[in-house]
Image (cartoon, rainbow, N blue to C red):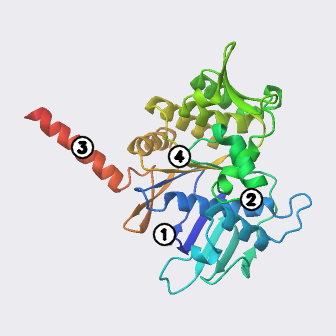
Amino acid sequence: MLNKIKLNNFGPLVKVDWLNLGRINLVIGGNGSGKTFLLKALYTAMRTLEEYKRGDDQRTAAEILAEKLYWTFQPDKIGDLVTKGADTGLSCDVQFDQRNFIYSFGKDTTKQISSLENYVPSRSSNSIFLPAKEVLSLYQIILKSREQDKAFGFDDTYLDLARALRPSSRMDRNYAEFAKSRQSLEEILGGRVEYDEASGRWQFKKGNQKFPIGVTAEGVKKIAILDTLLGNRYLDTGSIVFIDEPESALHPVAVSQLLDIVAVLADRGIQFFLASHSYFVVKKLFLIAQERDISIPVISAHDSQWTPANLRDGMPENTIIDESIRLYKEEVGLALK
């Protein structure tokens, strides 16, 4: 799994130094603080390691990385990812299973990364990025936009996810480690999402009834994506899953149940990185850390500064936490009047 992250001058991430990562890791901060940017920076590094030397792919690691950065962040040139006004270039140093993957480049870089060191062996497992917006209803549009039209719009996190959903899901092919988690996911859903080959559309099946995916609740579609990736074996016990805003479009009870399943899957080997601005998500993960006595590293953004902490040691200081406490005190004050 990823053990540590060091980023400098990576867009809004002027300096991030996050050590001693765990199976579940949380990024918190307000809108525009760089949470999603951080997850995407990690995702591009992991997908580079996973695509490198896979099958008949003859590209170098530097070529794969440049392409992933370009299509994930979609700048005019990848040098535009360097923090505006920075005196030095962008650098990224991630450690995976105690081995480093390091690269850097300056603001004038177009598509060629000349400084890259890779000590990580090729991987057979897959990472995936689950965006805040579900993709099932946009499935064919995403594939056409990128594979046929080669157009900006849907970045690589959407394209990779759409492609990952392609293999059909079969119950008899589940990894034994994931069987219970899939059952729990389906209990939350109250049914199953399936791909109809004839129509080329996803649909929600509940009992003997089938519903178009367009009229299915956003939260159902979001949870169904994770269920599908477990079912079609795209994810295995060595995978890393990045989830942007797990609370998006979900009822608080479903969020709590989903995070319990995340904890179970983490026990089975999957590593998770979650980005959130929800007090509810932070509190639920804090309770999981306390109940299970496990490390859940958290890094929080405030005024462009990134501060690491651990939910096993307590709730971190952050404006999200501060505002929730302020509202609670205001409510108590009103009740005591």
Kind of residue sitting beneath label 4: Ile
Q: Residues within 10 Å of mark 1 (few under 14, many from 20)?
A: some
User: Where is residue 253 shown, x and y percent of the image?
Assistant: 46, 29
Q: Name the one closer to the observer, 220 or 243.
A: 220
Q: Is residue 325 above or below residue 18?
A: above
Residue position for label 1: 12
State how far apart marks 4 and 3 are (Cα): 29 Å
Q: Which mark is residue 21?
A: none
Residue position for label 4: 294
Horizontal relation, residue 48 to residue 109: left or right = right
Q: Quadrant of residue 177?
A: top right
At 24% across and 43% down in the image, what residue appears?
327
The extreme right residue here reads 56
- Answer with mark 3 or mark 2, whichever residue precedes in sequence: 2
Q: Is residue 32 visible?
A: yes
Q: Secondary structure at mark 3?
A: helix
Horizontal relation, residue 243 to residue 326: left or right = right
Q: Secondary structure at mark 4?
A: loop
Kind of residue sitting beneath label 3: Leu
State how far apart marks 3 and 2 are (Cα): 47 Å
Residue position for label 2: 150
Q: Residues within 10 Å of mark 2 (few under 14, many from 20)?
A: few
Q: Where the C terminus falls, by quadrant?
A: top left
Residue position for label 3: 327
The extreme front residue here reads 149
User: Where is residue 287 shown, x and y percent of the image?
Assistant: 44, 40
User: Where is residue 326 shown, x and y percent of the image?
Assistant: 23, 47
- Answer with mark 2 or mark 4, whichever residue precedes in sequence: 2
Query: Which callout, 4 or 1, points to the residue nearer the camera?
Result: 1
Contact between labelled residues 2 and 3, with CB atoms less than 8 Å apart? no
